[in-house]
Image (tube, helix red, strand yellow):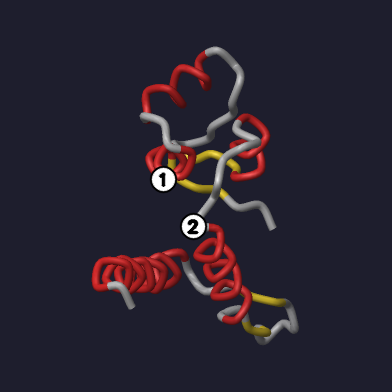
Amino acid sequence: MVRRISLSRAARLVGVKRNVLQQKIRAGELKAFEGEIVLADLLQTYPNAQIEDSGMLERVEQIIEQTSFIGADNNQCKPDNVALTTRIMSLSEDLSRQKTTGG
């Protein structure tokens, strides 16, 4: 599964300002689509980046997999983006609180 992250989040993960990533996108060194970057592309551009947040990205992937279900036509269905976004934001807020309080 391709992991996409926002440009702002990508900048925080690799420790640069957002405009640095925007310059790389304009120069063709990094691809973006609708304000998001593929994580693998980011890591290719910044191979020494310490992605401390990778556990959270893996958790998001697990949530998406766990929330899929088999529809009436026996095809695997995914929940709508609003439901996933709401759940991910809730988990992100929980993670931020845990980091702030130290546990």
Residue projecting furthest to the right? 74
In the image, residue 82 above or below residue 73: above
The residue closer to the viewer here, 90 or 13, is 13
| Pointer 1 local density, CA inside 10 Å: few below 14, some 14–19, many at least 20 | some
Q: Quadrant of residue 82?
A: bottom left
**Image quadrant where one finds the C terminus:** bottom left
Q: Position of residue 92 (x, y in %)?
A: 36, 66
Left or right: where does residue 9 sit relative to residue 94? right
Of pointers 2 and 1, the one earlier in the residue sequence: 1
Q: Residue at x 54, y 50 (%)?
A: 51
Q: Regarding mark 2 in the picture, which secondary structure is present there?
A: loop
Q: Residue at x 52, y 19 (%)?
A: 24
In the image, residue 81 above or below residue 10: below
Q: Alpha-carbon distance for marks 2 and 1? A: 10 Å
Q: Residue at x 73, y 77 (%)?
A: 75
Residue at the disc numbered 1: 9
Q: Quadrant of residue 100?
A: bottom left
Q: Position of residue 30 (x, y in %)?
A: 59, 26
Asked if the residue at tag 1 contacts the one at tag 2, i.e. Cβ–Cβ closer than 8 Å, the answer is yes
Q: Amino acid at mark 2?
A: Asp
In the image, residue 38 above or below residue 74: above
Q: Position of residue 101 (x, y in %)?
A: 24, 73
Residue at the disc numbered 2: 53
The residue closer to the viewer here, 24 or 14, is 14
| Pointer 2 local density, CA inside 10 Å: few below 14, some 14–19, many at least 20 | few
Q: Residue at x 46, y 26 (%)?
A: 21
